[in-house]
Image (tube, coloured by chain):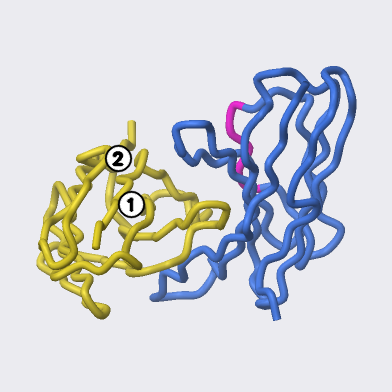
Chain colours: A blue, B yellow
Amino acid sequence: DTAVSQTPKYLVTQMGNDKSIKCEQNLGHDTMYWYKQDSKKFLKIMFSYNNKELIINETVPNRFSPKSPDKAHLNLHINSLELGDSAVYFCASSQVFISRSNQPQHFGDGTRLSIL
Amino acid sequence: EDQVTQSPEALRLQEGESSSLNCSYTVSGLRGLFWYRQDPGKGPEFLFTLYSAGEEKEKERLKATLTKKESFLHITAPKPEDSATYLCAVQARSGNTGKLIFGQGTTLQVKP
């Protein structure tokens, strides 16, 4: 069973379109994340949700809107796509609110977004 | 500002040639330092967590160590299957959000 799964794996679309990426985790974790990895493989946090509540919102254009229908799902919707949005987007999950423990984040295999 | 810098950016080794990857960090109180391995087309795969200076962890040919300013990932007698990008990340003590700050990674190539 895949622990953190993202769909789609590849997304090719034109500038100005709106698209969504879905993420699901079956690890029972309480926190989910979205990261963006640029062409130099630098991973940067975008958003994080804990039990459907937004807890991290980095400096990201408001064209990006995360939505968490329940603690096992975190989706990312992107409006008016721009060329600079081309990147690989990773979803991750972890169990944060456990005392005396630092649970590692588990990552999905990414969604490669290409803007034409 | 919390920051992570990894060096070298790329490393080529012959099979069996041991070496070390460096991760220098500045963070306002370290909650944990994480090492991940990333293969092409895949997400980062967790390797180790280190919590305090002096701590060491081992897994097969990999050994991670931690000081107050940096962490090393030592690779002993590497094999071609160790080829991957190795990512280091820190988690700050402040704000219990689980937020990770990543370095830019070291891409390791091991030639047979």
| In the image, residue B15 lies in the stretch drawn in magenta | no
Q: Name the residue under label 1.
A: B88
Give the quarter of the figure containing the N terminus of chain A: bottom right
Dot 2 falls on which chain? B
The residue carrying pointer 1 sits among few (fewer than 14), some (14 to 19) or many (20 or more) residues within 10 Å by Cα, namely many
Residue A61 in the image: above or below residue A38: above
- Which residue reaches farthest front? B112
Name the residue rendered at 49%, 41% in the picture.
Answer: A43
Tell me: B1 left or right of A80. left
Residue at the spot x=55%, y=57% of the render? B43
Work out whether mark 1 precedes mark 2 in sequence or the reverse, and give the earlier one: 2
Q: How crowded is mark 2: few (under 14 residues within 10 Å), some or many (20 or more)?
A: some
Residue B89 position, x and y percent, is 36, 51
Against B83, residue A75 (above or below) is above
Helix, strand or loop at label 1? It is strand
Q: In this picture, which residue range is highlighted in magenta?
A: A55-59
Q: Which amino acid does label 1 sit on?
A: Cys
Disc 1, disc 2: CB below 8 Å?
yes
Q: In this view, does B26 lie to the left or right of A47?
A: left
Q: Which residue is drawn at 19% across and 70% down?
A: B63
Q: Mark 2 points at which residue?
A: B4
